[in-house]
Image (cartoon, rainbow, N blue to C red):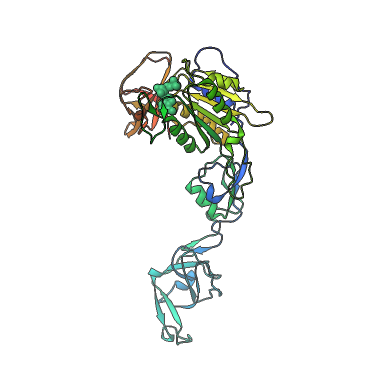
Amino acid sequence: MSRESPAPKRTGEGPLAPEAARELVLGEVVPLRGEPVPLEECRGRVTAAEVKSAIALQPFDNSAMDGYALRAADTEGENPSLRLVGESRAGHPAEVAVGEGEAIWISTGAMVPEGADAVLPVEDTSEAEGAAQQPGGSGGNQRFVLPARPARQGENIRRAGEDVEAGQVLIPAGRQLRAAEVAVLAAAGVAEIECAQQPRVAILGSGDELIPPGRPLGPGQIHDSNTYALSALAREAGAEVTSVTHLPDAAAATRQALAAALSPELHQISPLAGRKSDAVRPPDVLIVAGGVSVGRHDHVKGALTDLGVEERFWRVALRPGGPTWFGVLGRDGGRPTLVFGLPGNPVSAMVTFHLFAKPALRALTGLDLDAGRTHATLATAYRKKPGKAHYLRCRLELTDQGWRAHLTRDTQGSHVLTSMLAADALALIPAERKEIADGERVEVELLR
Ligand code: AMP
Ligand code: MG
C-alpha cells in the first residue's frame, strides 16, 4: 500500500532502525494493477476488487436428506399413509407438486417440489404397496410412505439464499485466495476473478565461490543457497520469479548482469492462454544477495548506482542483516523497480527478505501489512551488546501461560543456516537491551 505522505528520501548517516527501514521500503511501493484470472489459476492470488455473487446460495430450496418431501400436516394423526406421486432427484426436479395426502421421493440436494413443506428422512419411514394400505386408493402398483413420526414444518429443507444472498459480497478486495475462497467462488459460479498482477522478481546471487547444487565443490567453494532460498521465499510470498542470475566478483560483469536483470526483456512471461495483461514488464523487485558490502570485491552497490538506482538506505541497526541496502529505479511513465541488496550470509539474506522484501511484495498486491506479531516468553536468557536489534530464530510452543519461544539453535550466527529450520518466528530483542532474562516476555514476528 503506498503511503499518503511522500516517502522519506535517503536518510542521514548511520544505521536505521529496522522499523524505519521497513517504512522507507513501503513508502516506495506503487500497487500493481488488476488482471482477470481464471478460477483454476487463482489460488494464492490476491483480489484486486471485491467479488459479488450473482446468484443466491443455495440457488433454490432443496433437501438436506434422502427421504420424502411432504406436507408436515399430513404426518399428524394415527398411522398416516401418503401416496407417492413422483420423484425429485439432484438435477432432475419433480414434474408434479405435492398435494394433500401425497409425498415425493427426494434425494439430498434435490429441489423441494411445490406444495411440500418438510422432508422426512428415509430412516423415519417405511414403504408399502397396494390399495390395501389406502382405502380408496387406486390399488395395484401404487406405493405409499408410512411416516414413523410426525414431520416438523421446514424440517430438512435448506432454504434458497440461506448461505449467500444474490448480490452479496463474497470476497473483499485485497484478500489472498485460498482453498475456501476458491470453493465459494466456484459455488457462486464465478469463473474469472480480478486479481492484482503478480509481482515480478529478479534474483541474483553474487560471489566467485558459489557453485550450484548438483556440482562438486572445489577448494574454497560453497554451494549457492541464497538464490534458491530467495526464489522459494518470493514464490511463497505470491511473486513470480522471472530470472535468477549468478554474478561473479568482477565489476564489469556485475554491472552487465544487473543491467540485464533490470531490463524488461528478461522478464517476458509466456502468456497464459487468453491472458489479457502485458507479457513484457520490467521486474517490480530486484533482489541481489552478496557482494553488497564494503569488501574489495563487492561491486553491487557501485553497479546499481551507475545504472541509475537511487539509494534509499544502507545499513540497518539489526542482527542478522545489518549490511542491507535498498534503492529505487524510477522509470519514465512506468512502474519503479524496488532494489534490495541483501547481505550474502544465508541467514541474513532470509531474515532481511522477511523483514523488508516480503512486506513490499504484499503491499504491491494490496495485501494487508500486518506482520503477524505477538508476544512470547523467551525460554533461555539472552545477552548481547546494546546498539542493534537482534532477531532470533525461534520455535514457538503453546503453553498454559501462552507462547514460549525456544531458540532453534544456541548459536545464532548468520552462517548457521539450519537455525532457519523449524523456525516459526523471529524474537525481537530491542537495540538498547543488553540482557533478556529467561522467561521474559518479548515481541515475536511470525515467519509464516
Ligand atoms: P558477501 O556479502 O558477498 O560478502 O558474502 C557474505 C557471506 O555469504 C560469504 O561467506 C559468502 O560466501 C556467503 N554467500 C554469499 N552469497 C551466497 C549464496 N548465494 N549462497 C550461500 N552463501 C553465500
Ligand atoms: Mg561475496
Q: Position of residue 296 (x, y in %)?
A: 47, 15
Tell me what residue is drawn at x 42 percent, y 27 percent.
210
* Depicted 126 relative to depicted 319: above or below: below
In the picture as drawn, the residue positioned furthest to the right comes out as 333
Q: Position of residue 280 (x, y in %)?
A: 62, 38
Q: Position of residue 110 (x, y in %)?
A: 50, 66
Tell me what residue is drawn at x 56 percent, y 54 percent.
188
Write down the quadrant of residue 59 in the picture: bottom right
Q: Is residue 362 left or right of residue 409?
A: right
Tell me what residue is drawn at x 51 percent, y 12 percent.
14
Q: Is residue 381 left or right of residue 13?
A: left
In the picture as drawn, the residue positioned furthest to the top comes out as 13
Q: Is residue 255 visible?
A: yes
- Looking at the image, which is closer to me, 168 or 32? 32
Count of all numbered marks drawn on residues in the image? 0
- Looking at the image, which is closer to me, 92 or 262? 262
Q: Is residue 443 visible?
A: no
